[in-house]
Amino acid sequence: MNLSTYRAQWAYNPLREVLAGMVGTFALIPEVIAFSYIAGVSPAVALYASFVISVAIAITGGRPGMISGAAGSVALVAAALVHQHGVQYMLLATLLAGAFQIVFGLLRLHVLMRFVSAEVRTGFVNALAILIFSAQVPQMLHVTWHTYALIALGLVIIYLLPKVSAAIPSPLICIVILTAITMAYPMPVRTVSDLGALPTGLPSLTLPHVPLDWATLEIVLPYAIAMASVGLLESLMTAGVVDDATDTHGDPRMECTGLGISNIFVGLFGGIAGCGMIGQTVGNLRYGGRGRLSTFTAGAFLLILMVALHAYVGQVPMAALVAIMIMVSISTFAWGSLRNMLRQPKLSSLIMLLTVTVTVTTHDLAAGVAVGVLLSGVFFAWRAMGMLHIDRAKEGEADLYRVRGQVFFASADMLYDAIDFQTKARTVIISLPDATFWDVTSVGILEKIVAKLQGRDIEVRVEGLHARRHGLIAEQSDEPLLAM
């Protein structure tokens, strides 16, 4: 990325960027606090971490307009470590996770995301929309009618105000109006302060207070690798959503290293590792956040709210935040995917549905994506296997086998089963100009076929071997016959 492009990403519509980032801040607070309890850390730890991540990744990241924070599946991974060994071990894991993410980016391993199919991406987005909505349900249970009335009023403001004026993001107006109403007319509704004590000071530099020995490393390393992997997966998936929504391209490699640098800063300031947050990112995009300034503002404004305005933030009714997150969940869900299920192949729809089901059931985005990728690979192998065709014919006194298609671990047995080892012919020709051998399994099957036929004193001729298409055969086999 050149300097002029980087500067342009900061200068893009500053007023709109700041306002959109402020919306992102209020969307961050409830989810970050909720995940802090899941991870077993105090709300202050998670909020400080979100401030550090947003500010750092705004500077070092590769995807402008994306909001990151200390929540999501990373918190689920860290929870087991915190509960078993304490927060100090989590801090060391955060530092190591950041280092792994930097290495991941430097080695350009982000290309592995190309194995995530469109069906899995859609399932990821839809599952996240469902999880965002379901996370609001507890705030709507065992409450008085006042909460429902405020949520309804908030949704009216959010959806109808832009039809009058879009100068200020409607979620900000929603927060201000609903907070003013509850302060002027006290009513029995939950507020942000009910979620937990908000921090009142600045974060300070700290180092993990753990013994630096092999025993500690054995404890922390598996969690650090898992946190790094899950964080990268969620961030790169979120970056892909931003790419699709804005018709632009981020820098995945820079995003990986930027997230790593950000998480190292988080660990140094006593926070929990974080990653991209798709719900808050969609909200940021919806209200005009496209550049780095909106990401920076989301973090900077969070610190301002925590330090200078925490008393007022604590008075914000949860109904206002619930209304915002309901809007975000509706915007996040890919409604067109429901219609496409009737048009696209059934296997594609099945992959999408299973990705959603696993993610929603486990509340683990990484698990859902992993299952989706695995099934995509299995179904692709199944379709590729069906493209292998083997025709048998006579060429004089010889048996001729014409092989067309892809020969690999899933289809190699089809080639083996097609050969008649009891043939009366004294010569067998295996024609391969229209076939491609992809792996050791397929090469081994070909060698096995040749060896069995030769063992019956049958002459074998393998024709059509080209180095560019069958170089693997030449590399794996010492049989002169296979080089013909």
Image (cartoon, helix red, strand yellow):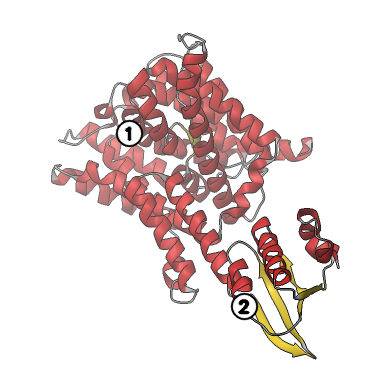
Q: Residues within 10 Å of mark 1 (few under 14, many from 20)?
A: some
Instruction: Using the image, determine if residue 72 lies above or below residue 195.
Output: below
**In the foreground, 94 or 135:** 94
Instruction: Using the image, determine if residue 16 lies above or below residue 166.
Output: above
Kindly report which numbered mark, 2 or 1, lies closer to the viewer in this rendering. Answer: 2
Instruction: Using the image, determine if residue 294 lies above or below residue 458.
Output: above
Residue 127 position within the rendered picture, expressed as x and y whole percent measured from the top left: 40, 53
At 52% from the left and 65% from the top, the residue drawn is 379
The quarter in which the N terminus is drawn is top right
At 41% from the left and 33% from the top, the residue drawn is 77
Q: CA distance from mark 2 to mark 1?
A: 59 Å
**In the foreground, 141 or 283:** 141
Residue 460 position within the rendered picture, expressed as x and y whole percent measured from the top left: 78, 74
Left or right of 103 in this view: 313 = left
Of the residues shown, which amino acid type is indicated by label 2?
Ala
Which numbered disc flags the more N-terminal residue, 2 or 1?
1
Residue bearing mark 2: 418
Residue 144 position within the rendered picture, expressed as x and y whole percent measured from the top left: 13, 43
Is disc 2 placed on a helix, strand or loop? Answer: helix
**In the foreground, 278 or 75:** 75
